[in-house]
Amino acid sequence: MAKHQFQTEANQILNLMIHSLYSNKEIFLRELVSNASDALDKLNMLVLTDEKYKGVTFAPRIDIIADKETKTLTVKDSGIGMNEEDLMNNLGTIAKSGTKAFLENLTGDQKQDSNLIGQFGVGFYASFMVANKVEVITKKAGETQAFLWTSAGDGEFEISKSSRDSHGTTIVMHLNDDEEEFLETHRIESIIKKYSNHIPFAIFMDKEKHIPAVTDDDGKETEPSRTEIENTQINRANALWTISKNEISDDEYKDFYSSIAHSSEEPLTWMHNKAEGAIEYTTLFYIPSKAPMDMYRVDYQTGIKLYINRVFITDDEKELMPTYLRFLRGVIDSKDLPLNVSREILQSNAVMNKIKNASVKKVLSELSKMAKKDPKKYEEFFNEFGNVLKEGLYSDFANREKILELMKFNTLNSDEKVMIEEFVKNVDEDKKEIYYITGKASLSMLKASPALEKFKSRGIDVLVLNEEVDTIIFPMVTEYKEYKLISVADAKFEESEDEKKEQEEVAKSFEGLAKEFKDALGDAVKSVETTSDLVDSPVKLKEDKEDPAYMMAQMMKQMGQ
Ligand code: ADP
Ligand code: MG
């Protein structure tokens, strides 16, 4: 028997589970069933594709066993199982991305933190919310030695040799005294129905079955009523995405979201689409109501699962959907991909690319529908994910116009955000120029910029883009339909003869002053000029965007230097 210490971060999570989580404990079952389902998914694929697993039988099932005498609750699967090394790596550490960010985000406030934990997807360690001791008996498919992992959640775990009939994993939880509700059949069944009804595998449990009394023709009881224990399937196990839309209720969609997104919050919306034709595939995408915590991290966790004809392939492939849609959660399933796809093949596979491109188009058009039909909901969406979606403006050239139409812009003349289709209605139809100003500043500061004075005096509206990313993205977006996008610094307006003359005179009279300024400022500025652009302000700074030094400074700023 060997003792081991949990990795520091795993230990922190464990402590949270044990000491600070009081609400919504039932999700531990969702997490364990989800792991069992993952383990079955993994074995399914290997048996179908890997020579090494040819002799292994795939007989998928998940069993839940409640024992009131020993006060134990057991979750058992016939999946891939783990060997000693797997146990060390998987149940002693946390490989999940965003763990650090998660731990840093904790506030110490019960309510807020349990919300965060819900978002984080708690995993195996959630078992310690209800148990004071957890045993894992497991045997890896294709191997002969089984192992026992035990821990009381007190910083250490032990691994020893053990025995198990066939491959798979059994998790035995010794429940705390006040958690005995989780031994009640109806309680377990309702949790499973809520979170795991539509996972692709069947879950079984012993259930009391009422058998009514038998009576003869005269109404005389010949056999009394009785109860029998029957091993019963308690979930539908129908892979929700394979069912047709009109047979799925909103609640079923929401429950499935909870199981695949490991979230206790309701999704903002979902898009379920079946494509038939040259390539057959089904997608079920959800938009969460809250941005995942790791959304702005390079090592963010992907939320899309790829299935090939209901066989799980991967949920760790960032190329499945473009990064600017990384907030999506859901499933892509197609019959038309080869089962033994490798990562490299997946990335260059023509069928996969077609599915991806069509899916992106579908998501963008669904968003556009939402913007028109349900502006309030769209606003919620845009507040959470608008800035991520915006990245698509430079990374997805093919869909730039559509993405531009999904943006909501602050403008000089409006107090509310405006969409570009609305904005162009007020653009000069002869010039067809959309003006914008960028800068990392508050909205009111940017709106007060001297560079906007000539627009104010002419009553021309301007897009006011005050996010840091805007300064990088918008110089690259040069057109929308027949309109040109032009930075306010480059906008030129025709001047009347009188204006030109006046300008020349003014320039002449200020020549001396301009020279004095230049002398005083020295190398800090390139030149000092007079301008007719300003109406109220005496001076403004003008950036020379072509200057390599300027562009470099912008890049460095964006990279956080
Ligand atoms: P996640 O499922 O997000 O990876 P978990 O904490 O739920 O995180 O599980 C950690 C790891 O432990 C899993 O990735 C898997 O490798 C392993 N594991 C957990 N439960 C099982 C199981 N029933 N069968 C096989 N492996 C398991
Ligand atoms: Mg898990």
Image (cartoon, helix red, strand yellow):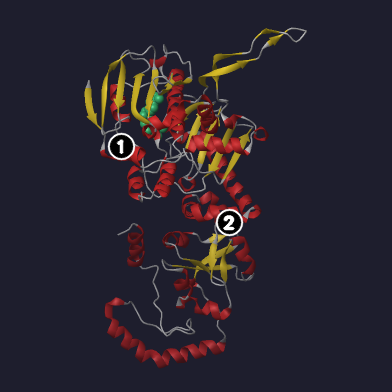
Question: Which residue corresponds to the image point at 35% horizontal and 18% vertical from the top-left?
Answer: 140
Question: Which residue corresponds to the image point at 37% horizontal and 21% vertical from the top-left?
Answer: 81
Local packing at callout 2 (Cα closer than 10 Å; few below 14, some 14-19, many 20+) is some
On the image, numbered disc 2 is attached to which residue? 405
Q: Quadrant of the C terminus?
A: bottom left
**What amino acid type is highlighted by mark number 2?**
Glu
Q: Quadrant of ligand 1?
A: top left
Vertical position of residue 10 compared to residue 383: above or below: above
Question: Which residue corresponds to the image point at 75% horizontal and 10% vertical from the top-left?
Answer: 219
At numbered mark 1, what does the secondary structure look like: helix, strand or loop?
Answer: helix
Q: Quadrant of residue 515?
A: bottom left
| Label 2 – label 1 distance at C-alpha | 44 Å
Q: Which mark is residue 10?
A: 1
Q: Is residue 295 visible?
A: no
Vertical position of residue 463 compared to residue 453: above or below: above
Q: In screen coordinates, is 146 left or right of 504?
A: left
Local packing at callout 1 (Cα closer than 10 Å; few below 14, some 14-19, many 20+) is some
Question: Which residue corresponds to the image point at 40% horizontal and 34% vertical from the top-left?
Answer: 123
Q: Which mark is residue 536?
A: none
Going from N to C along the chain, the mark reached first, 2 or 1, is 1
x and y percent of residue 271 in the render? 59, 41
Q: Is residue 2 visible?
A: yes
